[in-house]
């Protein structure tokens, strides 16, 4: 199954209406692009879900030990500066950005772009659309992003102000200066 995009330009949803739509339909995953189109994302299969869990597990374990930021799994929503609402498969922000949010902001979709994101391409995702999403994160302030393409056994690395770097079948990948000391073991993901 592929994702479904609905053109809602004639029926604009407010941020609160979009949030309520998501809350009342928890069995579905929604995103909105910068034009306000509603993207209904198909559920992933067991294999992709397991790999997403392994990615989140490694990020959360590192974040717990490191203590400098807050990790998120694929159920978190982010209101990007361009107006899009996105849910990366895994994300992280520094603690000071989290602490700058008020309690209401922490309860809803976070009004910021994560410093770090991971997208794991599932069989229902097109490479073109996933790359566009990664570019959108970068254009909105993501400092480091990884597109993990299991089908091609590649990782695309997105950094602010730099060309995309492609790694072929790496066994690990470093969090660089954004997540110092974090190293994702990809042997559990391939």
Image: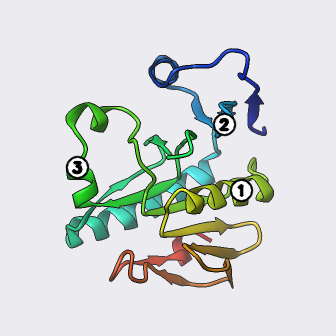
Q: Secondary structure at mark 2?
A: strand
Please indicate whether residue 104 sits to the left or right of residue 114 in the image. Answer: left
Q: Is residue 101 above or below residue 183?
A: above
Quarter holding residue 92? bottom left
Labels in figure, total: 3
Q: Is residue 107 above or below residue 94?
A: above
Name the residue: 43% across, 56% down.
114
Quarter holding residue 91? bottom left
In-front residue for pair 79/41: 79
Quarter holding residue 121? bottom right
Name the residue: 50% across, 46% down.
80
Name the residue: 63% across, 66% down.
147
Question: Residue 41: which numbered mark, if any?
Answer: 2
Q: Is residue 96 above or below residue 101?
A: below
Mark 3 and 1 residues: CB-CB less than 8 Å, in contact? Answer: no
* Spatial separation of the CA atoms under disc 1 and disc 2: 15 Å
Residue 156 image point, x, y percent: 66, 74
> Which callout, 1 or 2, points to the residue nearer the camera?
1
**Crowding near pointer 3: few (<14 within 10 Å), some, many (20+)?**
few
Name the residue: 61% across, 80% down.
162
Quadrant in which the C terminus is drawn: bottom right
Residue 64 image point, x, y percent: 23, 64
Q: Which residue lies under the disc numbered 3?
A: 100
Earlier in the chain: of badge 1 and badge 2, it is 2
């Amino acid at each position: 199954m592929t994702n479904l995009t609905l053109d809602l330009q004639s029926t604009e949803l407010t941020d609160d209406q979009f949030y309520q739509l998501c809350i009342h339909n928890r069995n579905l995953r929604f995103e909105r692009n910068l034009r306000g189109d509603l993207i209904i994302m198909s559920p992933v299969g067991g294999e992709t879900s397991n790999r997403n869990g392994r990615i989140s597990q490694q990020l959360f374990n590192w974040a717990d030990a490191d203590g400098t930021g807050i990790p998120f799994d694929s159920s978190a929503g982010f209101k990007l500066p361009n107006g899009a609402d996105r849910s990366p498969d895994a994300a992280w922000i520094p603690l000071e950005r989290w602490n700058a949010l008020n309690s209401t902001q922490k309860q809803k979709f976070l009004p910021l772009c994560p410093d770090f994101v991971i997208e794991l391409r599932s069989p229902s995702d097109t490479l073109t659309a996933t790359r566009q999403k990664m570019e959108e994160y970068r254009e909105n302030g993501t400092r480091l992003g990884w597109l993990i393409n299991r089908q091609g056994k590649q990782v695309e690395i997105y950094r602010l102000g730099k060309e995309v770097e492609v790694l072929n079948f790496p066994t690990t990948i470093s969090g660089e200066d954004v997540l110092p000391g974090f190293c994702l073991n990809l042997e559990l993901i391939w």
